[in-house]
Amino acid sequence: MEERIKTEETEKNLRECHEVQQCEARPRAAWEPVPAGSFNVFLLFNLEAAWDEGHCILALGPVGGPFETYSYYRHSTKLEAPGIMACLRDPMTFAALEQASGWIVHGEPGNWWNEHVNCAIALTCDEVSFNGVRAYAEQRRRHPGTYNLVTYNCLTFCDDALRAGGIRLTTLSGRAVRTIIPKDAFKDVDDVRGARPFQAWKYWFPLGEPPADGLRTIQDAPGQDKPLE
C-alpha cells in the first residue's frame, strides 16, 4: 500500500514537472541572442533520486562546448554525513545530453554509474559570473565538507555556487531556492537575476533505455530508492 502511494506521488510529480516545462519552455522564435564568449550554467534534476525527493546537479561550461558537472551528495541515510562530489566521467555538451535524453555517466574514479536527469534549467552568463560560480564549485569539490539534508544539501550547494557568481533564481512561491525540496524546485523557479535564460530555458528529457556500457544504473523505477553504494 505504502509503495503504491509513493509510486503515485512520484508519477504525479513527473507529470506536473513535465507540464510546467511544456508551459514555460521558450519557443525557438523567442530565444535571445547569446553574446560571443558567453558561458552556460545548468541545473540538472534527477526527480526520482533520494527516495523521490529529487536531486539537483550543477553543470558548467562554455556555450556550445563541453560542460562539467558537480553533484553534491552523501553515502548515508543520516541527516548529516560527509559530503561527496560526483562529476562526469567525460565532459559532454548540452547537445549531447539532449541526444542522450538525459543519460550521463557519473561518479568518481573507480565508482562510475549511469544516471538519468529528467529535466534542466538553462542559463547563460558572462565570464566574470561564470568564474565565480566555478570557483565555488571547485572549492567544494576539493573540500566537500559536511552534507546536511536540511541546511546544506545538493540544492543548497547549487544555490550558493550561483550566488558566488552574482546569480539569483527567483520563485513563484517567493521562497528562497535553498528552502525548497529539490523535486519541487524545477516547478517553482520562474526567473533569474544576474544571468539570462538560455534558449528554451526549461528542458525535459524523456526516460529511455540506459547506455549499454556495462556500468550499473541508478534505477528510475518510481517509488524506489536509488542507492549510490
Image (spheres, rainbow, N blue to C red):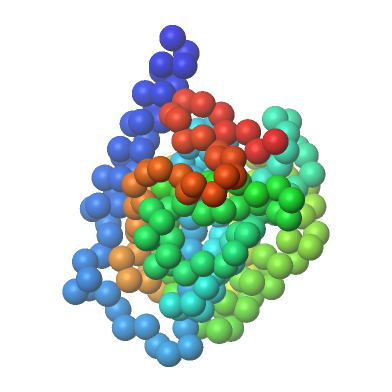
Residue 159, how many percent across, how many down?
58, 58
Q: Residue at x 57, y 45 (%)?
A: 214
Residue 132, how many percent across, how many down?
64, 75
Does residue 184 sit above or below 103 in this rendering?
A: above
Q: Residue at x 70, y 30 (%)?
A: 77
Outermost residue on the top side: it is 1
Q: Quadrant of residue 29?
A: bottom left
Q: Quadrant of residue 136?
A: bottom right
> Along the horizontal axis of the image, is 171 left or right of 150?
left
Does residue 67 sit above or below 17 in this rendering?
A: below
Does residue 127 sit above or below 137 in this rendering?
A: below
Quadrant the C terminus occupies: top right
Residue 47 seen anywhere in this rendered image of the structure = yes
Residue 13, how many percent across, how many down?
37, 35
Residue 122, how many percent across, how many down?
42, 65
Quadrant the N terminus occupies: top left
Residue placed most toward the observer, 17 or 217? 217
Q: Residue at x 48, y 88 (%)?
A: 37
Residue placed most toward the observer, 209 or 162? 209
Q: Residue at x 41, y 56 (%)?
A: 100
- Total number of numbered discs in the rendering: 0
Residue 186 seen anywhere in this rendered image of the structure = no
> Along the horizontal axis of the image, is 144 left or right of 113?
right
Outermost residue on the bottom side: it is 36
Outermost residue on the left side: it is 29
Does residue 209 sit above or below 86 in this rendering?
A: above
Q: Quadrant of residue 24?
A: bottom left
Residue placed most toward the observer, 178 or 108? 108
> Along the horizontal axis of the image, is 18 left or right of 162?
left
